[in-house]
Amino acid sequence: MTGAMSGTTAVSPTSRQIWTRSRGILLVVLILVVAGFVIAVIRSGGGHGRLDPRSTDPSGSRAVAELLKERGVTTRVVTTLDEASTATGADTTLLVAGPDLLTGRQQEVLRTAMDTSGGRTVLVAPGGNSVGALAPGASADTTAPVSAREPQCTFPAARRAGNADLGGRRYTTDITLGSDSCYLVDGLPTLLRIGTQGAGDTVLLGAPDMLYNERLGHHGNASLALQLLGSRPHLVWYLPSLSDGSAAGDARGEGGTGIGRLIPSGWLWGTLQLAVAAVLAAVWRARRMGPLVSERLPVAVRASESSEGRARLYRKANARDSAASALRQAARSRLAPSWASTSRTPTPPRSSFRPSRRN
């Protein structure tokens, strides 16, 4: 050998090449980490979330809680079903900020507590499943845009408040005695009050907009909110939490809070459509696997460049068997002529002379 074999080959990437290729990915990762840290710091301040009585954000409800406090109504925030069920009573108003987040078993437990409490329950924008479980006799219809609307009913709280920002879910009910249908849109109410056992009642709000900080001062929103939530001396503000242990046993069933339920159905269908589109695109763009076809190169390429390029392809694909087979084939092609020439031995020519036989 004329020289020692080095630890790397001509196709091995250098440290500079590795850094050049990976610095873009590292920069993107660094930006994502910094952005996540900044967002976490910003959200760790006074904002607690949408429809939260502790939040001062535009979509929070701190203003409602402060107004109720000035009128002597205590507001208690709970995040578990046990706290919400035990806090109900004749002198308590229970506001459920996300009825659709409750599992089927949680809705049954909450409904039992509502029936025996004798207080008021306010359900904010309940959907079809939660309306059927928490307000028997009512059902959810299509949605309508939120805007200032007239009460158009005899419910005292609505008549005193006047115009309010209502809309969202519309409801229907077959209960006529002890119920009020207010803020109608195409004949269907977006605020429905249903009387329950004793002096209690259940109020269905089609949209939460009137409780937001940014909208509380518009029209009669503040008056309607104070009358709905301040009719009892105590207000329990129930914000369903994903960490509630009461939903663990029902997480995999219908209405559970598993990861699949947290994804809207539209996103699931969209993901399925994207998967089908990706498969069709792969089939469309796939190359037909057939025999190689030789073609004339547009330029002359040196043999060393072709060998090095082919070696890089083999290295990238980790095709050791193919590379070894190519080397063996090339070695056989080069050794065959030499082996054939050395294996041939010349045969001496035959002579036609025959010696005479002597006596």
Image (spheres, rainbow, N blue to C red):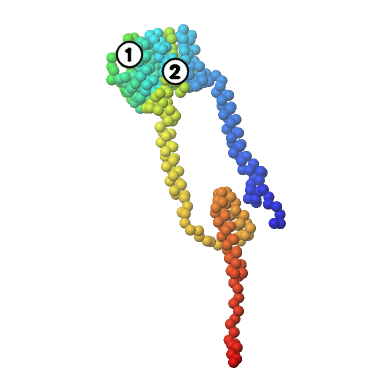
| Amino acid tagged 1 | Thr
> In the image, 11: left or right of 164?
right
Query: Would you name the residue on which mark 2 appears?
Result: 80
* Residue at left offset 61%, top offset 36%: 27
Residue count near mark 1 (Cα–Cα under 10 Å), binned few <14, some 14–19, many ≥20: many
Residue 225 image position (x, y, % from top left): 43, 15
In this view, the residue in front, 103 or 4, is 4
Closer to us: 11 or 1: 1
Query: In x, y percent, where is residue 262?
Result: 44, 28
Q: Is residue 212 visible?
A: no
- In the image, residue 345 lies at what x, y percent? 60, 73
**Is disc 2 placed on a helix, strand or loop?**
loop
Label 2 vs 1, first from the N-terminus: 2
Q: Residue furthest bottom?
A: 359
Q: In percent of the image, x 47 and y 15: which residue is there?
A: 77
Q: Nearer the viewer, residue 162 or 101?
A: 101
Identify the residue under disc 1: 196
Against 151, residue 318 (above or below) is: below
Left or right: 6 with respect to 25? right
Furthest residue in direction front, as rendered: 359
Using the image, determine if residue 273 lies above or below residue 339: above
Residue 29 is situated, as x and y percent measured from the top left of the image, at 59, 35
Q: How many marks?
A: 2
Q: Is residue 223 left or right of residue 309?
A: left
Position of 10 with respect to 329 (left or right) is right
At a point 49% along the width and 12% down the height, the residue shown is 66
Whole-angstrom CA distance, mark 2 to mark 1, is 24 Å
Q: Residues within 10 Å of mark 2 (few under 14, many from 20)?
A: some
Q: Residue 232: give its label.
A: none
